[in-house]
């Protein structure tokens, strides 16, 4: 990606901002990466999902979880990576109490994948895409969790829970191709959406299943070499990633403008103060002493296996979005909304299949179904209104069985009770009155009791007709077929 | 290959070992000897032999993703010098 200048909002106007993101995503599995302990640690009492392997006991031996390996390769394929035939695990050595063995099993020089790319919405040009390189997607193990405590005497210590240690963790390393904080936000949303489409990670940032570190540097426009890189950590939301990058851009620009030099270091984002602070300078940088993991044999992924995994890829968000726009003739905004999640897209397509009315399905879902999800906080597959319900409602409308006025009431009832719209209409007598005799009486009554409107109509006032239609609809409690009501009114008034 | 006292300090820091000035020069010598010993491997002709990290001729050993019971917590914590509420209690450590 070239360093094109983005007009306007960049606070670092004399410098090009260079951003690369590292995303860590927990892989959804039953068991941990190298042992059979459950990886569903959320809510489990501390240190109850622990065995000699994840405890780092001497003599214990790790064995790879096939599902985690496959999920990593599938993710790499979705991110257009190459899958080398040969890969291996390595030990990354450092001392910290969250690491049981004194090293983390990770991948150093021969990861599962490399050299991919990802397209994401260009925040500066709505409707356009930008492309960023993916350096690699590799697999490692998560660490234990630490709770820092200060007791009443003022003593500080840490409490360690090993349940999370050994949970499979995918790392998606992006190339330094992003140029604004907003691009970073857009890139992150694209990564999260793909992980969720693949079902390989919940990608929930607030649960710690999705984490992001940002490498930020500045360089004068046109300079080929990168400036000194600052790694920013500790962001706990998408918003804080964007804010931390924005802060860091300004901080670095101010230093450079004052004639200073950027120190290569790791900085932490302090959310409540909205600043980054030094965590570790380059001098104190870790020396991880990577070496090949002697307890795990290498992994060979033959081309046929890569193709087998590729064939498991679902239709990805971008492809689905384009197909929706083309096949159903919807705007890119609507296509975007309907493909937010794979489940919502499936809900839409099932509704279309059952109702044969894509336009109505899109309208009902983007307007009403999303509103219901918003107010209830439910997921699409948890609500009582299934695609069959929605399709039934659409058919009742398309056949003129109910009017657009009664439809919201039927929908409401279906959402609350799970009853089929057809049954609701029958039970509650909400069917549209298309019976000419019944309507003729109502029309005659409306004409008789509204002489002024009748006079206005005869005087050529267009609004008078609407008033009379309203009177009939009121009398039929909204069930009159509006077309028929209009026709009957005209017959009686003009005849 | 000669290790400097600074190299020894670096390695000691990584290993979280406190060493005396006397240790420093002694370890520098000893570790240099160890490295020198392994230099003998350089004498071998490895032309046409691809680098390997494993001597066993096996690869891709994996297990199915099935969870099985973990250890009882008493056993997990049995060796812990200090514990509290089911957690390992450790010294407060600020990342350096
Ligand atoms: Zn375990």
Image: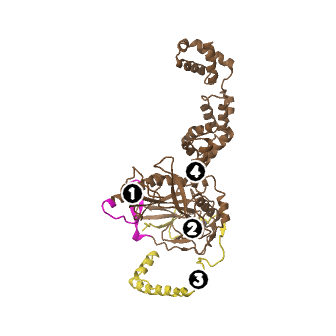
Chain colours: A brown, B yellow
Q: Nearer the viewer, residue A366 or A431?
A: A366
Residue A101 seen: no
Chain of the residue on which disc 3 is drawn: B
Chain of the residue on which disc 4 is drawn: A
Residue A333 seen: yes
Q: Secondary structure at mark 4?
A: helix
Q: Secondary structure at mark 3?
A: loop
Mark 3 vs ligand 1: CB below 8 Å = no
| Tags 3 and 4 on a common chain | no
Callout 1–callout 2 Cβ contact below 8 Å: no
For disc 4, the neighbor class at 10 Å (few under 14, some 14 to 19, many from 20) is some
The region drawn magenta spans: A256-285
Q: Secondary structure at mark 1?
A: helix
| Tags 1 and 2 on a common chain | yes
| Quadrant containing ligand 1 | bottom right
Quadrant position of residue A85: bottom right
Q: Which residue is mark 1?
A: A249
Q: Position of residue A88 (x, y in %)?
A: 59, 71
Viewer-side label of 3, 4:
3
Q: Which residue is mark 2?
A: A111
Q: Position of residue A15 (x, y in %)?
A: 37, 58
Q: Which residue is mark 3?
A: B47
Q: Position of residue B65 (x, y in %)?
A: 65, 62
Callout 3–callout 2 Cβ contact below 8 Å: no
| Tags 4 and 2 on a common chain | yes
Q: Earlier in the sequence, mark 4 or mark 1?
A: 1
Q: Earlier in the sequence, mark 4 or mark 2?
A: 2
Q: Is residue B50 above or below residue A3?
A: below
């Amino acid at each position: 990606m070239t360093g094109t200048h983005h007009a306007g909002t960049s606070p670092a106007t004399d410098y090009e901002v260079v951003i690369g993101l590292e995303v860590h995503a927990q892989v959804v599995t039953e068991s941990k990466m190298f042992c059979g302990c459950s990886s569903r640690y959320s809510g489990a009492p501390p240190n109850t999902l622990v065995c000699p392997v994840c405890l780092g006991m001497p003599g214990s031996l790790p064995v790879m979880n096939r599902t985690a390996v496959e999920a990593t390769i599938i993710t790499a394929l979705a991110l257009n990576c190459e899958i080398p035939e040969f890969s291996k695990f390595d030990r990354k050595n450092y001392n910290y109490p969250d690491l049981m063995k004194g090293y983390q099993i990770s991948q150093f020089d021969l990861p599962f994948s490399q050299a991919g790319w990802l397209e994401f919405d260009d925040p500066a040009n709505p409707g356009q895409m930008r492309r960023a390189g993916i350096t690699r997607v590799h697999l490692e193990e998560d660490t234990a969790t630490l709770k820092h405590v200060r007791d009443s005497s003022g003593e500080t210590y840490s409490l360690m829970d090993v349940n999370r240690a050994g949970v499979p963790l995918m790392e998606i390393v992006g190339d330094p191709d992003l140029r604004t904080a907003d691009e970073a936000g857009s890139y992150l949303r694209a990564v999260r959406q793909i992980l969720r489409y693949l079902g390989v990670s919940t990608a929930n940032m607030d649960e710690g299943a999705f984490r992001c570190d940002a490498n930020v540097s500045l360089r004068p426009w046109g300079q080929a070499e990168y400036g000194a890189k600052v790694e920013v950590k500790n962001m706990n939301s998408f918003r804080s990633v964007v804010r931390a990058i924005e802060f860091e851009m300004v901080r670095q620009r101010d230093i450079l403008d004052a004639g200073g030099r950027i120190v290569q270091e790791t900085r932490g984002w302090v959310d409540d103060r909205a600043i980054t602070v030094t965590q570790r300078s380059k001098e104190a940088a870790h020396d991880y002493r990577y070496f090949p993991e002697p307890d795990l044999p290498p992994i060979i992924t033959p081309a046929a296996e890569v193709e087998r995994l590729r064939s498991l890829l679902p239709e990805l968000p971008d492809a689905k979005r384009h197909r929706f726009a083309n096949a159903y003739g919807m705007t890119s905004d609507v296509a975007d909304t309907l493909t937010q999640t794979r489940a919502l897209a499936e809900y839409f397509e099932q509704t279309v299949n059952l109702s044969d009315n894509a336009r109505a399905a899109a309208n009902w879902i983007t307007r009403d179904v999303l509103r219901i999800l918003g107010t209830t906080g439910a997921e699409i597959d948890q609500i009582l209104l299934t695609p069959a319900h929605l399709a039934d409602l659409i058919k009742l409308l398309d056949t003129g069985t109910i009017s657009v006025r009664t439809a919201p009431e039927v929908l409401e009832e279906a959402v609350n009770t799970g009853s089929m719209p057809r049954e609701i209409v029958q039970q509650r007598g909400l069917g549209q009155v298309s019976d000419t005799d019944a309507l003729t009486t109502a029309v005659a009554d409306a004409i008789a009791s509204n002489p002024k409107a009748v006079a206005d109509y005869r005087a050529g006032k267009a609004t008078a007709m609407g008033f009379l239609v309203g009177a009939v609809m009121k009398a039929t409690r909204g069930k009159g077929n509006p077309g028929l009501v209009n026709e009957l009114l005209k017959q009686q008034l003009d005849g | 290959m000669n290790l400097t006292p600074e190299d020894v300090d670096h390695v000691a820091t990584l290993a979280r070992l406190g060493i005396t000035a006397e240790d420093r020069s002694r370890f520098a010598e000893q570790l240099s000897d160890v490295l020198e010993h392994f230099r003998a491997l350089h004498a071998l002709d490895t032309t046409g032999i691809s680098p390997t990290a494993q001597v066993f001729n096996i690869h891709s050993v994996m297990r199915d993703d099935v969870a099985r019971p973990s250890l009882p917590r008493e056993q997990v914590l049995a060796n812990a010098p200090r514990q509290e509420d089911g957690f390992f209690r450790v010294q407060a450590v600020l990342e350096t």
